[in-house]
Amino acid sequence: MKNNVIMSNLDKHTQRLLLLFSLFASSVIILIVFFIVTRGMLPFITDNDGLGRVSLFRFLTGTVWLRGATFVSTAYGAGFLVINTLYVVFLSLLISFPISILSALFIAKICPPRIAQMFRMVVEILTAIPSIIFGLVGAGFLLPIIYTLATTLGYRSNAGLGVLGVVIVLALMSIPTLTTISETAIRSVDRSLEEASYALGATRAQTNAKVVLISAKGGIFAATILAVGRALGEATAVSLVAGNAMSGPSFIPFDITATLTSMMLMGLHETSGIDYDIRFSLGIVLLAVIFIVNVTLNFIKKRVGDFGE
Amino acid sequence: MKKLMLFLLSLTLVSTVAACGDSNFDETGTINVYTRDTSSGTRDGFMSGIGFSEAATDDSLLVSGFTTNDNAGIMNAMRSDRYGIGYVSLSSVNDTIKPLSINDVEPTIENVMNDIYSLKRPFNFMLRLEEDYENETKYLLARAFEAFITSEEGADAIDDAGAIGLSSEGPFSTIVEDHPVCALDNSDITLNIGGSNSVTKVAESLTAAFGPRCGNPSFVHNHTGSSDGFKRTQGDEKDSPNALDIGFASRDFRGEELINGEAFYAQAAWDAIVVIVHLDNPVQSLTLEDLKNIYGGEIQTWQSLID
């Protein structure tokens, strides 16, 4: 009887402590969003020290970052940044997704166990590399190659800066994350499913493609959501290879571009006044984009999950 | 499958070799224009220097297709972009790119001091108001530092850091008599220095040379941008944890920053702005008019400039 009472007290306290931690973690997110939103709303609702309000419609649909002189004009437009951001992330996913999934499949199912262990370690270390390293490698190593490629093909290129550089850097950054998590998901597929497939006469390739990958769909999707989240929010690496275009969505691989994050970063230390506050507004747009993309991906995951199982 | 792979591989190899082989500078190539962003002091100095000061803060006046980047980014780009043109600080120039002369005047330190090289921008500094200093000693040290900047040793320190010192007022030993605070032991005092990050090297060089000559105060450098040069000494953040005792800016102080008058700010040095191109570019010198036309879009290919 006594033991039961002591256990339940400990339980209660532990539960309360865990609740406290969860509340703290969630309140941090709420604090961040609250801060960004309140600061970022200002250019649209206040007079900006006599400069006038920033037009919300123009901001969301504009194709030129700023018409007129900085610190004086309020004609900001961020629409093209949203399109650029989604475009480069999508393209980078086109590159990183096949590479990661197939690598994960190889490491989990095909590779001899000892070598698999080594690969797993290498990829895990790669996930820890800070993004600025990718940016510096991109700027120093990739840009001259892209420039040579562009001149060979007859395109005008600004020293290799542009869409292609951003896409490659983002792909390089997404691959380690996608690979480790997908690999774990693939490894945890029930062995009996595989064996059933072999028993029915399927080849290794058929089993891998139709049974293993489909069963690991949930984990692979989770990995994709994480990788996309990281790519959407990447600032430093992108700003070093993007070229900081000031207008229009950029679709040609050799054109300079800009994303929401790289625009926030540009000239950040030297700027002031409305030019500084408008970056918080960009922050709101970025948070909205990340939120919508996450919700969409989760929705797709649920629908796909239903079919898969 | 193998044959296809081999074919693709040889195709890429041939194309890379072809690209390497072509080292003729194509005069009809479009000029790729690089610039700093609108809040940069270097851009301000450059645009005013070429007579295009409206474009210092207004991107829509520039030729379309320009690339914006920071100092290091422009240097990096000019290493590979054969048709590019950009501008950087004199202290960044090295032999991986080609600096251009302006009106046949080379961008050297001597030419800036002689005032015949015209593309330059000021490095200015600002002090706090006397009553805003933590104690009288700090205020006196700041004034002594101000005097040090114009001494011979100060000019040397500035030159070491890659900027150009103003004409000096003699060795510090003659000036220090007016600043008895330097005879005291100031090793328990810490001064906060900050402001423009373009001035970081110069500021650090100055404080390193000044310290031993004035009682060894210590210095903490926190350079975050020209706007903070005013904000953290006399502006909104002057009493915040980020407050500075001396703030630097890589541009002239403007607007509300001049509110407390000339007694509390002065120029420390010049920084020359150099126009750079790729090493293969045959152009040697340009006029300010040429530069204005290039950045404004009236001249779009290298052809008219190579004569």
Image (cartoon, coloured by chain):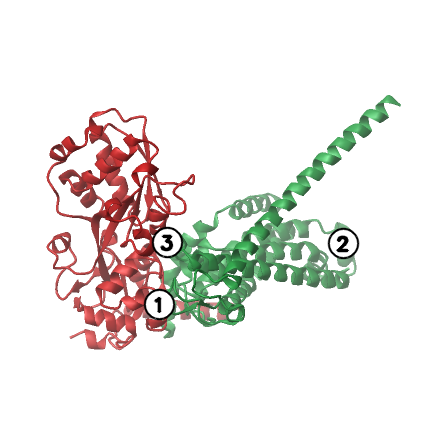
Chain colours: A green, B red
Is residue A170 something that shows in the picture? yes
- The answer to whether residue A86 is left or right of residue B87 is right
The x and y percentages for residue A306 are 77, 62
Q: Tell me the quadrant of the picture where the N terminus of chain A can be found.
A: top right
Three-letter amino acid code at the position of disc 1? Asp
Number of marks in picture: 3
* Chain name for mark 2: A
| Element on which disc 2 rests | helix
The x and y percentages for residue A215 are 72, 57
Q: Which residue is mark 3?
A: A270
Give the spatial CA distance, label 3 vs label 2: 63 Å
Three-letter amino acid code at the position of disc 3? Glu
For image coordinates 13% across by 32% down, the residue present is B173
The answer to whether the residues at label 2 and label 1 have Cβ atoms under 8 Å apart is no
Three-letter amino acid code at the position of disc 2? Glu
Vertical comparison of A148 with A220: above or below? below
Q: Crowdedness of circle 1 by 10 Å Cα count: few (<14), some, many (20+)? A: some
* Chain name for mark 3: A
The x and y percentages for residue B200 are 30, 45
Q: Nearer the viewer, residue A149 or B137?
A: B137
Give the spatial CA distance, label 1 vs label 3: 16 Å
Q: Nearer the viewer, mark 3 or mark 2?
A: 3
- The answer to whether residue B100 is left or right of residue A67 is left
Q: Which residue is mark 1?
A: B58
Q: Which residue is mark 2?
A: A195
For image coordinates 29% across by 38% down, the residue present is B130
Give the spatial CA distance, label 2 vs label 1: 67 Å
* Label located before the other in sequence (3 or 2): 2
Is residue B15 something that shows in the picture? no
